[in-house]
Amino acid sequence: LSSSSAASDVYKRQAVHVCERLVQTLATDSPPYPGLKITLSIGVADTQQTMESGEDVLKLADAALYRAKRNGRNQIAHS
């Protein structure tokens, strides 16, 4: 792996870790209203991939988000 690729992997792991903490916090915290259930699905995009524009990053994140939603509630997917 190149140093750029290794750094990208570290950033992706850190981003996924933050997302996992968010999902876990929402799953364990008491909702503000009785009977309210909050779930969270997140798509993470790797900006180190070759892309032409910011729109490309959003497309990757959007695709990852829909992949997370297909996998069930409280899921995280990355590009």
Image (tube, rainbow, N blue to C red):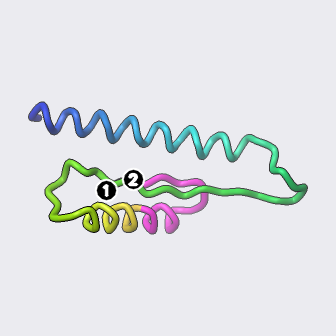
Mark 2 or mark 1, which has the lower sequence index?
A: 2
Picture disc at residue 44: 2
| Mark 2 closeness class: few <14, some 14–19, many ≥20 residues within 10 Å | many
Q: Tell whether 55 sits left or right of 20.
A: left
The residue positioned 45% from the left and 63% from the top of the image is: 65
Label 2 sits on a secondary structure element that is strand
Magenta region includes residue 72: yes
Label 2 amino acid? Val
| Range of magenta residues | 65-79
| Quadrant showing the N terminus | top left
- Residue carrying label 1: 79
Q: In which quarter of the image is residue 12?
A: top left
- Mark 1 falls on what kind of element? loop
Please give the name of the residue rendered at 17% of the width and 61% of the height, measured from the top-left corner: 51
Q: Is residue 29 magenta?
A: no
Q: Which amino acid does label 1 sit on?
A: Ser
Do labels 2 and 1 touch, CB within 8 Å? yes
Cα separation, mark 2 vs mark 1, equals 6 Å
Residue occupying the point 43% across, 57% down:
43
Residue 57 appears at what percent x and percent y? 29, 61
Q: Is residue 57 left or right of residue 76?
A: left
